[in-house]
Amino acid sequence: MAKKQDLRVIRTRKMIVDAFIKLVQENGFENLTVQEIADEAMINRATFYAHFKDKQDLYHYVFSFALDSIKEVLSIEILTTDHKVDISNVENMLSRFFRLAQDNRGFFKILTSSNNTTTLTETLRSVLQERYAEIFDNLEIKQGQTLIPTSFIIDYMTSIFVGILHWWLNNNSDFSPEHMAKLVIQLIANGHLTVMGVEMTYDPSHLDKPDNA
Amino acid sequence: MAKKQDLRVIRTRKMIVDAFIKLVQENGFENLTVQEIADEAMINRATFYAHFKDKQDLYHYVFSFALDSIKEVLSIEILTTDHKVDISNVENMLSRFFRLAQDNRGFFKILTSSNNTTTLTETLRSVLQERYAEIFDNLEIKQGQTLIPTSFIIDYMTSIFVGILHWWLNNNSDFSPEHMAKLVIQLIANGHLTVMGVEMTYDPSHLDKPDNA
DNA sequence: AGTATAACAAACATAGTGTTGGTTATTCAA
DNA sequence: TTGAATAACCAACACTATGTTTGTTATACT
């Protein structure tokens, strides 16, 4: 069991964390000083160092919470017993994910934003990639006749996902989490884009074997 | 006309730029000091400041070259006179882009890498988005019956593109630039993924109107 | 060969980091 | 309620990196 903590410790740490989140949301992570965090939290700078080794340490502490939630949502089983993808499970997983993002919008905006250390975006990416790696490890992905490397699928899907999430969070979109889930599935699994009434289809026969560079 | 420059100026600046590129490729942008750049370039630190205002300034100087090349490649006209997308032009554009990336692999790796300031990745993203915005400004994009916002298409495609590029540069892939161009087109315009022989299709009728959150 | 000036070297002020030692205030538990 | 434990405070310090300045030396241009 977690042994009883001094009230002061809990209170101070909360103030630091709250100040950190507020300041990062306002000004980004880049030029944030420990003194500013201490000021906002109304504590002495030395006290900060009594709680966290440095800024990175605080960063990890704060984001581990978010990542745990994300990982939990992503951990839903999406394969059937015979190793096929169960789309309804995927849809469920994605809905929960977008719901989580909606409920913690400010936080997820940071995760996908541009004017922060890449680490933030990469944190999300790595979690996603980890999960994708699990999912696609046992699957064979084909495009037409060509077998597509798993590493490609992972990078590809992660990018799509982060991109869509980024858009959704930054455009005050009307789309609900459930709608987003469906959209993602449709785009990834069956992505047709109709441009000006003309389908941008492409003859897959052009794409047979890699012609080494 | 560019008036004649003192040889020393040209030489020194070249040494700074070369040193910068080398060091960023080795250790990333994050913890790079001006002193280290000066040491690698074998110049005095004060001389650095005679050439560049600060590290950011150097960064902009260096990357403006790359971005100009990228912009030039992307500027190829891809629409027909009646505002339809000409796929063969797109393929041409993409081929050139991947060729450029291949020829400047180290550089593009930085552009798409993770352990650098986001600014680097974002630089590429913004250039791409700028171009996409031009292209898709006059086009109506539909998915089934739903009209998809341009902002979405831009974020979506940029993500796919950066993702694919990232994978290609980091997996020593055999795929040639021309093959990559075809792959991108096929994935974006007509992206079916076949998983374990089972097409991951999804009934588009589920996706009609946004059900506001 | 003489002049202009780039590059150098050393020093300085400034700002941020992370640590330390002594003091004050608050929490906890007997 | 009081005493012991210790969190938080404060001031100072060493250290690192930035960006500037000044006078000197070396080198490119004409």
Image (cartoon, coloured by chain):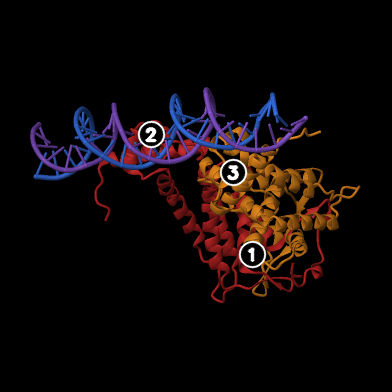
Chain colours: A red, B orange, C blue, D purple
- Given residues B164 and A110, the one toward you in this image is B164
Residue B10 visible somewhere in the drawing:
yes
Q: Residue furthest right?
A: B81
Q: Residue furthest bottom?
A: A82
- Given residues A178 and B73, the one toward you in this image is B73
Q: Residues within 10 Å of mark 2 (few under 14, many from 20)?
A: many
Where is residue B127 drawn, in percent x and y? 71, 45
Q: Is residue A94 above or below residue B119?
A: below
* Chain assignment, label 2: A
* Chain assignment, label 1: A
Asked if the residue at tag 1 contacts the one at tag 2, i.e. Cβ–Cβ closer than 8 Å, the answer is: no
State the separation of the CA atoms marked 1 and 3.
Answer: 23 Å
The residue that appears at 40% across and 45% down in the rendered structure is A58
Q: Are marks 3 and 2 on the same chain?
A: yes
Residue annotated with mark 2: A38
Residue annotated with mark 3: A114
State the separation of the CA atoms marked 2 and 1.
Answer: 44 Å
Q: Are marks 1 and 3 on the same chain?
A: yes
Which amino acid does the dot numbered 2 rest on?
Answer: Ala
Which amino acid does the dot numbered 1 rest on?
Answer: Phe
Q: Is residue B49 left or right of residue A67?
A: right
Q: Is residue A112 left or right of residue A142?
A: left
Residue annotated with mark 1: A152
Disc 2 on helix, strand or loop?
helix
Name the mark on residue B3: none
- Given residues A101 and B130, the one toward you in this image is B130
For the N terminus of chain B, the quadrant is: top right
